[in-house]
Amino acid sequence: AISELKRGVQYLVPELKNLTEKTQTVAPSLIHPCLLVKTLTKREKEILAQIAESKTTTIIARKLYISISTVNNHKANIMLKLQISGRNTLITTAIALKPWLETAA
């Protein structure tokens, strides 16, 4: 387990490994938050951090000097990578990942 983690490989106990081999996906709730954050780009992390601070799309766009459409594209990419759907889930996830976003920035 330790050697896999050092290599940056997601470690799963054998029971979960067997489950994921059958389903080919792992429920996001079973993955450590640090590994979820690692899948995001720097800009996606910045946007997710802003979402965690309850910033609107317009405010995020102004603060990061990008268009509203670009913010929405980043949000869509974040939702795909984290396998979530819906704005409320995105906000909840952003708040839950906030400690890891601050350390990853």
Image: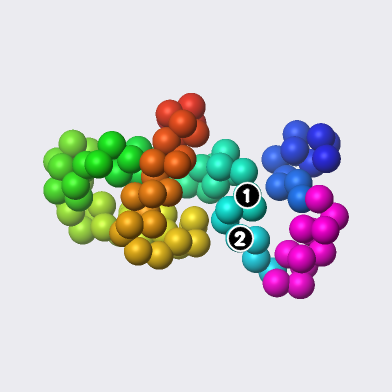
Magenta-drawn segment: 13-23
Q: Position of residue 11 (x, y in %)?
A: 76, 46
**Residue 82 appears anywhere in the view:** yes
Q: Residues within 10 Å of mark 2 (few under 14, many from 20)?
A: few
Q: Position of residue 66 (x, y in %)?
A: 20, 46
Report which residue position mark 1 lands on: 31
> Colour scheme used in the picture?
rainbow
Q: Residues within 10 Å of mark 1 (few under 14, many from 20)?
A: few
**Which quarter of the figure has residue 63?**
top left
Q: Position of residue 52 (x, y in %)?
A: 33, 40
Marks 2 and 1, Cα distance to the nearest angstrom?
7 Å
Q: Please name the residue shown 18% across and 54% down the image.
A: 68
Check disc 2 and give the amino acid type: Ala
Q: Main secondary structure of the magenta part?
A: helix
Decide if residue 29 is on the left or right side of residue 59.
right
Q: Position of residue 82 (x, y in %)?
A: 49, 56
Q: Name the element at disc 1.
A: loop
Report which residue position mark 2 lands on: 27
| Nearer the observer, 93 or 4 | 93
Check disc 1 and give the amino acid type: Ile
| Nearer the observer, 63 or 87 | 87
Q: Name the element at disc 2.
A: loop
